[in-house]
Image: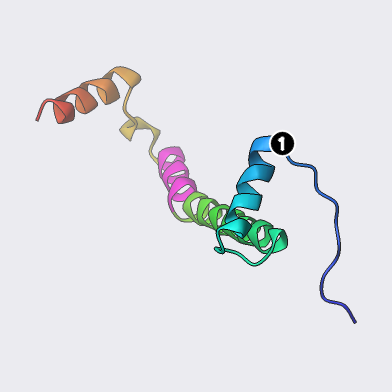
């Protein structure tokens, strides 16, 4: 059984030129390799964003819901950032 699927992809000229230049330079053996590498990078970024949301954002939101009085106002955030910038 075949483990790949042939597809037709339409790219803007600039992206198509970039794919071709990667192959011409010898960095990749084929256009398909370039696109596979790009999709692997996209999948890795998606996993990183999901992990950040799960491990940092969701717990911070839960802490805020549990203790809403500990939240800072927009003005307090600006003041803290301003003091950090001036250090």
Where does the magenta region start and end? 56-66
- Measured as percent of width and height from the top left, residue 21 is found at 60, 51
Dominant SS of magenta comes to helix
Q: Nearer the viewer, residue 62 or 78?
A: 78
Q: Of helix, strand and loop, which one carries label 1?
A: loop
Asked whether, in this view, residue 64 is left or right of residue 16, the answer is left
Q: Crowding at label 1, few (<14), some or many (≥20) Cα neighbours within 10 Å?
A: few
Q: Is residue 58 above or below residue 75?
A: below
- Measured as percent of width and height from the top left, residue 28 is found at 60, 64
**What is the residue that sits farthest to the right in this orientation?**
1
The residue tagged 1 is 12
Q: Residue at x 49, y 48 (%)?
A: 58
Q: Quadrant of residue 60?
A: top left
- Measured as percent of width and height from the top left, residue 11 is found at 74, 41
Q: Is residue 59 shown in magenta?
A: yes
**What is the residue that sits farthest to the bottom in this orientation?**
1
Q: Nearer the viewer, residue 48 or 9?
A: 9
- Measured as percent of width and height from the top left, residue 37 is found at 61, 61
Q: Nearer the viewer, residue 72 or 15?
A: 15
Q: Residue at x 61, y 46 (%)?
A: 18
Q: Nearer the viewer, residue 10 or 43?
A: 10
The colour scheme used to paint the residues is rainbow
- Quarter of the figure that contains the C terminus: top left
Asked whether, in this view, residue 82 is left or right of residue 56, the answer is left
Asked whether, in this view, residue 21 is left or right of residue 2, the answer is left
Q: Is residue 63 shown in magenta?
A: yes
**What is the residue that sits farthest to the front in this orientation?**
24
Q: Residue at x 43, y 51 (%)?
A: 56
Q: Quadrant of residue 70?
A: top left
Q: Is residue 61 above or below residue 33?
A: above
Q: Is residue 68 above or below residue 47?
A: above
Q: Residue at x 33, y 22 (%)?
A: 73
């Amino acid at each position: 059984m075949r483990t790949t699927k042939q597809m037709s992809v339409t790219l803007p000229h600039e992206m198509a030129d970039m794919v071709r230049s990667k192959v011409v330079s010898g960095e990749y053996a084929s256009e398909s390799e370039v696109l596979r590498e790009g999709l692997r990078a996209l999948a890795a970024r998606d996993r990183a964003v999901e992990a950040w949301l799960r491990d940092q954002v969701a717990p911070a939101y839960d802490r805020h819901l549990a203790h809403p009085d500990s939240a800072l106002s927009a003005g307090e955030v600006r003041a803290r950032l301003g003091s950090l910038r001036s250090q």
